[in-house]
Amino acid sequence: MSFENVKQFFAQAGADDKILTFEQSSATVEEAAEDVGCEPKQIAKTMAFYVDGHPIVIVMAGDARTDNRRFKDTFHQKAKMIPTEQVEEAVGHAPGGVCPFAVRPGVAVYLDESLKRFDFVYPAAGSDHSAVKLTIPELEKFSSCREWVDVTRGWQEETRRRNGIVVFGAAFMDIKGYPLSQMIPDGRNAGRVLQTHGGVSRNIVEDIGNVELRPTYVSVVDNTSAGTDIIEKLKRHQINTDYILRRENGLGIWLAIFNKDGDVAASISSRPDLSDLSQVLKDRGDEIIGGADSVVVEIDMDPPLLKKIFELADRYGKKVYAAVSNMSIALERRDFMKRTDCVVCNREEAGLLFSEDYSATVPEDLMRIISHKIEMAQFPKMVVTLGAQGAVYADKDGGCGICPAPSVRVADTTGAGDAFFAGVAIGLTYGKTLRESCVIGTRLASSAIATKENVCPRFLPSEFGLQPGGFPPENA
């Protein structure tokens, strides 16, 4: 009778041709997959639970398993499956044929996120010798689902693509002014004005892409041609842009005036609103972070976004590296800094962080100071860049050192710190020591400041002892 009810349900909807019947049993996922001729994970199995004493059904992929923690987060109680002998009376279908169609009145239907990766899925049709071939929109329509939920595990590892180093932060358009002669701070200056793509995180992800490591960028741009240009350029550098949103006023602006030495004389910026990324993390955070080799964040992003990113990183055991774009804001995020694997900042920012003046401190002394400071602050690792003097680094176990900078002709110093950070993140992600990572950072930074671009030129992973996928060769 259950099968007849489902058949009548689809006939009334003019879709009875979607029902498949078999001579062999389709009661299990494996049997149904063999009957249909699909992979077992495409079988949409329907599980029955009691929630607040009422029956519900959740349709999930054949390779998914109920995750008790996620179930409790969603329904605010432990998962309690309906006993086998009670299933037919509770939902209207017997075990082996349970489906989300023609269920008893009052039975709520939920669809699990594990189904969204397929073009077609195959739920049962009320008996253990039947199935229905449906697209995901058709499944939503015919099941009259209450909502989508994320209550399963076990399928993500197999299906999750590798996202490389995942970078979160704001994208900017940089407007740069270069004087033709000595700049007059309070007067008018003749010169050149250039527009380039910028932003700390955007620069970092392009630097990583320029080492051919295929990172992922999670950000917001606007709906103008500038936003389109940023996305298209990132794609050309083999950067995954699937998680970039387009919103009005989604692009930041940085206006800077340079002196003849290539240093910034003055600047002002307008930051974009990244709050919509919270929905991206809610909908696709497991997919993004679960497939990451590591995570890079601008530590001065809004706390709710940082909190969610760190929660996901903890869930999947991913290391987080913190970049600083505004230390005055980042000071309010010290609790997050303790949870990062490495913080990278410049000398002035380190002074703000520890409420001291390091402007005249020589590298040898600063190295020892930073080593002591991070031990007291409980930061796992820290690197402080010193411009032409290179960088100092330290870890919580007492290791520290100085990484000198090569002598190069400076064209534009903007982007050098971002390139250095990218090198450090690359090295630490793919098995290098902190010192080796700083050497990679120094090389990228020195190449970036020799041009008027905000990023480093192209390198091969092998130039840093890495394979194309990032990790060191097995015989390295």
Image (spheres, rainbow, N blue to C red):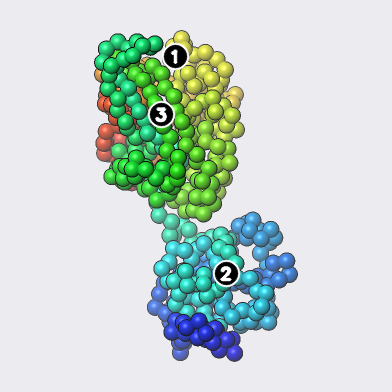
At label 3, the amino acid type is Trp
Residue 254 tag number:
3
Q: Is residue 215 above or below residue 413?
A: below
Q: Amino acid at mark 2?
A: Cys
Alpha carbons under labels 3 and 2: distance apart: 46 Å
Provide residue 186's location: percent of width, then percent of height: 39, 11
- For disc 1, the marked residue is 364
| Relative image position of residue 373 (x, y in whole percent) | 56, 21
* For residue 82, above or below residue 397: below
- Residue 314 location in percent, x, y? 55, 45
Q: Amino acid at mark 1?
A: Glu
Q: Is residue 287 left or right of residue 109?
A: left
Closer to the camera: disc 3 or disc 1?
3
> In which quarter of the view is residue 2 placed?
bottom right
Q: Quadrant of residue 50?
A: bottom right
User: For the N terminus, which image quadrant?
Assistant: bottom right
Residue at image x 40%, y 51%? 242
Residue drawn at point x = 26 percent, y = 39 percent: 460
Secondary-structure class at tag 1: helix
Is 201 placed left or right of 327 in the picture?
A: left
Q: Nearer the viewer, residue 223 or 403?
A: 223
Q: Do the residues bearing badges 2 and 1 touch, measured as CB atoms within 8 Å?
A: no
